[in-house]
Image (cartoon, rainbow, N blue to C red):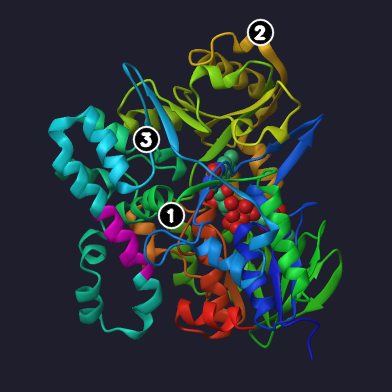
């Protein structure tokens, strides 16, 4: 007899998804979270009368319709009977993009997206349409692969998913440059690159396609009240299915018996379970929670070779400026040029040359008092362990505010509240290595079968979240939670999981 069937370490969106589904399937589940609230990077915090999102601004997959095989967050909420408990606000256009000499938006649906961008670059219409359709084909083949792969021969899989096989090793730049010649359109097409933390020459085309088609076809959503509401709702779903959650419970060790996982040690107490799902940092799980001696050299070498993603710096602002009057959308990307690889190189040097401006109060005025807006300024940044973040913070915040003031003149004179979140802050609140925003980078050699898999070689140990498969971003980690739940339950096809849970 053990205390629980499954213990999940961490209440990021990957851990929450997995825990809820396992509880609904009838497992007794305990979720242990180090912080005082759920959500990981999707958690929110309150200052004065302002409700901020710490990280997440926008997600996809929350509606009932979209591309074939998508809509995973909708299916998750449906399986847990939570659809009525949460309100999503549609975000269309999903981005506004500001470049020197070009300001435009990225609208939803493939037809409108192509029509709008082709209107700006008429000579590129055919290539643009083919590229966007190829992205959709890839996104649909990825979900087909998740559904079918384990039961198919290599030859049969290749026949069924030709684009996935052809482009599995390609970067976005490799493919986009075949279809589009104009460097400005190439830049515009790749405007959302910060969502994956890698520029066009480095990001996996397959992962890019699932992200872009998610926002463009499945739809883009903000969560009314902030993303903390989504995390709280998933906790509710877990508890309704007899699962338990304990906050302020940092797991110190994963215990083993006879070479298998036997439970965890938390706050000095041992709790037993034959299955532990780690939503925590991958290397922390292997090196500290379990111990390297329990893994093969080959596994450890693979893990050491994996590259973590960059972190993020955020400036959280409240202002009494009327931000709607500046033509901003929920999320606007401000770039000083069209070459995102050059921007990425600057970012890696710690040079702040671009940012995104998020104004959630344009969609949900309840987050701030009347007549005021919230603004999050976001840029990627490496952790650089030697950096004294406390000293640097004020300087970086000032640089980002000055940069944002190019788009929002007068901002500096209308700051009612300002706080900074550095890579060290990201690490402190989630224990992700160096505040990595997306787990391992989603480069072609770190996605699909080449990513660290959700079932570890140690019996009873699983992973869910952005260090596992498929990868980072809220949609990705929810898919990862679904995949891990499926593996623990021994259910081969995702459709079977939804059928069995929705009928309960
Ligand atoms: C600033 C920022 C903005 C972002 N914006 C977006 C966005 O707009 N849209 C989007 O899709 N993605 C966004 N992302 C990426 C996305 O937030 C992440 O990829 C995703 O949320 C990670 O989820 P996860 O399940 O892997 O868990 P995480 O969010 O990494 O959370 C892990 C949890 O585990 C807990 N934990 C860790 N160790 C232990 C332990 N030993 N014991 C107990 N608990 C432990 C932590 O406290 C934490 O709550 C953003 C990321 C950042 C940093």
What's the residue at 57%, 79% (across, down)? 458
**SS label for mark 3:** loop
Please provide percent x and percent y for residue 338: 30, 26
Q: For label 3, count other residues whose C-alpha is less than 10 Å away and answer few (under 14), some (14-19) or many (20+).
A: many
How far apart, in angstroms, are the residues tagged by discs 1 and 2?
A: 39 Å
Does the magenta portion include 136? yes
Q: Nearer the viewer, mark 1 or mark 2?
A: 1
Position of residue 315 relative to residue 382, above or below, is above
Quadrant for residue 10, please give it. Answer: bottom right
Pick the front one: 328 or 249: 328
The residue that label 2 is drawn on is: 413
Please provide percent x and percent y for residue 84: 67, 61
Q: Main secondary structure of the magenta part?
A: helix
The residue that label 3 is drawn on is: 191
Instruction: Report the number of discs.
Output: 3
Quadrant for residue 117, please give it. Answer: top left
Residue 11 is left or right of residue 384, and the answer is: right
Q: For label 1, count other residues whose C-alpha is less than 10 Å away and answer few (under 14), some (14-19) or many (20+).
A: many
Q: Quadrant of the C terminus?
A: bottom right
**The magenta segment:** 134-143
Please provide percent x and percent y for residue 497: 53, 80
Pick the front one: 83 or 150: 83
Position of residue 51 relative to residue 133, above or below, is above
Identify the mark at residue 218; answer none if there is no mark: 1
What's the residue at 59%, 78% (across, down)? 502
Residue 67 is left or right of residue 166, and the answer is: right
How far apart, in angstroms, are the residues tagged by discs 3 and 2?
A: 29 Å
């Amino acid at each position: 007899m053990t205390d629980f069937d499954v213990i999940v370490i961490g209440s990021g969106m990957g851990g929450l998804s997995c825990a809820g589904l396992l509880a609904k399937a009838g497992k007794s589940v305990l979720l242990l979270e180090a912080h005082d609230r759920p959500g990981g990077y999707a958690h929110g915090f309150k200052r004065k009368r302002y409700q901020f999102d710490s990280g997440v601004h926008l997600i996809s997959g929350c509606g009932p319709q979209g591309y074939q095989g998508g809509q995973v967050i909708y299916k998750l909420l449906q399986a847990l009977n939570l659809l009525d408990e949460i309100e999503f606000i549609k975000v269309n256009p999903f981005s506004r993009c500001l470049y020197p000499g070009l300001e435009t938006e990225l609208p939803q649906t493939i037809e409108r997206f192509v029509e709008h961008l082709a209107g700006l670059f008429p000579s590129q219409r055919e290539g643009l349409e083919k590229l966007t359709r190829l992205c959709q084909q890839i996104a649909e083949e990825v979900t087909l692969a998740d559904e079918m792969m384990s039961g198919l021969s290599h030859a049969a899989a290749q026949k069924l998913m030709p684009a996935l096989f052809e482009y599995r090793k390609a970067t976005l730049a490799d493919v986009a440059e075949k279809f589009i010649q104009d460097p400005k359109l190439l830049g515009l097409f790749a405007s959302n690159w910060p969502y994956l933390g890698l520029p066009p020459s480095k990001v996996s085309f397959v992962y890019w396609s699932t992200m872009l088609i998610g926002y463009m076809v499945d739809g883009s959503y903000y969560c009314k009240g902030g993303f903390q509401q989504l995390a709280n709702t998933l906790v509710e779903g877990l508890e309704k299915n007899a699962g338990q959650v304990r906050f302020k419970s940092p797991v110190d060790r994963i215990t083993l018996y006879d070479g298998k996982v036997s439970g965890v040690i938390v706050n000095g107490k041992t709790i037993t379970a034959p299955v532990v799902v780690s939503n925590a940092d991958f290397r922390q799980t292997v090196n500290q929670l379990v111990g390297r001696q329990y893994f093969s050299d080959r596994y450890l070498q693979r893990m050491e070779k994996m590259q973590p993603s960059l972190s993020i710096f955020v400036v959280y602002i409240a202002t009494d400026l009327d931000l709607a009057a500046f033509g901003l959308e929920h999320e606007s990307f401000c770039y000083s040029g069209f070459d995102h690889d050059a921007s990425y190189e600057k970012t890696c040097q710690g040079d702040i040359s671009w940012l995104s401006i998020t104004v959630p109060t344009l969609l949900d005025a309840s987050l701030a008092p009347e007549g005021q807006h919230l603004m999050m300024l976001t840029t990627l940044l490496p952790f650089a362990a030697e950096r004294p973040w406390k000293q640097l913070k004020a300087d970086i915040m000032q640089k980002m505010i000055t940069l944002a003031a190019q788009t929002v003149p007068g901002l500096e004179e209308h700051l009612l509240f300002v706080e900074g979140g550095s890579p060290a802050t990201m690490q402190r609140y989630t224990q992700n290595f160096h505040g990595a925003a997306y787990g391992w980078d989603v480069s072609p050699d770190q996605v699909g079968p080449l990513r660290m898999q959700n079932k570890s070689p140690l019996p009873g140990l699983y992973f869910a979240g952005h260090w596992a498969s498929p990868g980072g971003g809220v949609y990705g980690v929810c898919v990862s939670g679904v995949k891990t739940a499926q593996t623990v339950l021994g259910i081969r096809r995702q459709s079977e999981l939804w059928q069995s849970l929705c009928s309960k």
